[in-house]
Image (cartoon, rainbow, N blue to C red):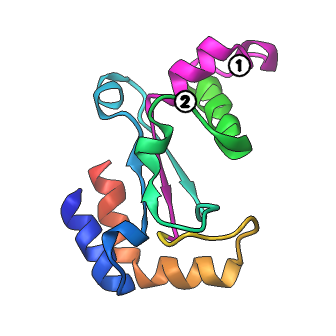
């Protein structure tokens, strides 16, 4: 994946460290799970670039990621009732076995600007397709 990040960096004209680096949250667990789940999101709510996978390695943070964890639990466990999906152990386990990418690799705000998401996705669509294929 490092070569993809070099390409994203070149396309954005920014150092890799300025990007929000995403992908498989826990490589070891992801390779073992039967159902491969990739969440495609718009952008990260952040002021700076960072490694999203490292940030989320141990557990979800913030409202968006708790929702993603519950979605993962529902998808991997046959869509049980919410009270089952809401069990901490179930969603934490499911969350560790997913991948998540943002269409826009630069930091964004609390509310995504759709035209920026579209412009960024169009700018890097060939690299995004390869990233998805590698996942």
Image: magenta residue range: 77-104
Q: Of the numbered discs in the image, which one, if any, rests on residue 55?
A: none
Q: Position of residue 30 (x, y in %)?
A: 35, 30
Which image quarter holds the N terminus? Answer: bottom left
Which of the two residues, 15 or 25, is positioned nearer the viewer here?
15
25 left or right of 28 in image: right
The CA distance from mark 1 to mark 2 is 16 Å
Task: Tell me which residue sits at (21%, 60%) in the image.
Answer: 2
Residue position marked by numbered label 2 in the rendering: 59
Residue position marked by numbered label 1 in the rendering: 85
Which of the two residues, 113 or 38, is positioned nearer the viewer here?
113
Q: How many marks?
A: 2
Which of the two residues, 81 or 113, is positioned nearer the viewer here?
113
Element under disc 2: loop
Compared to residue 123, the image places residue 84 above or below, namely above
Please identify, in this view, whether the residue under mark 1 or under mark 2 is nearer the observer: 2
């Amino acid at each position: 994946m490092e070569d993809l990040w070099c390409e994203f960096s070149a396309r954005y004209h920014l150092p890799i460290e300025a990007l929000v680096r995403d992908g498989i949250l826990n490589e070891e667990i992801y390779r073992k799970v039967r159902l491969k789940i990739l969440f495609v999101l718009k952008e990260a709510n952040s002021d700076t670039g960072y490694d999203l996978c490292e940030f989320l390695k141990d557990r979800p943070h913030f409202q968006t990621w708790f929702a993603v964890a519950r979605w993962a639990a529902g998808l991997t466990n046959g869509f049980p009732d919410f009270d089952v999906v809401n069990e901490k152990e179930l969603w934490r386990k499911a969350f560790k076995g997913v991948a998540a990418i943002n269409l826009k690799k630069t930091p964004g705000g609390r509310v995504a600007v759709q035209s920026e998401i579209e412009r960024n996705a169009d700018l890097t669509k060939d690299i995004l397709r390869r990233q998805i294929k590698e996942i």
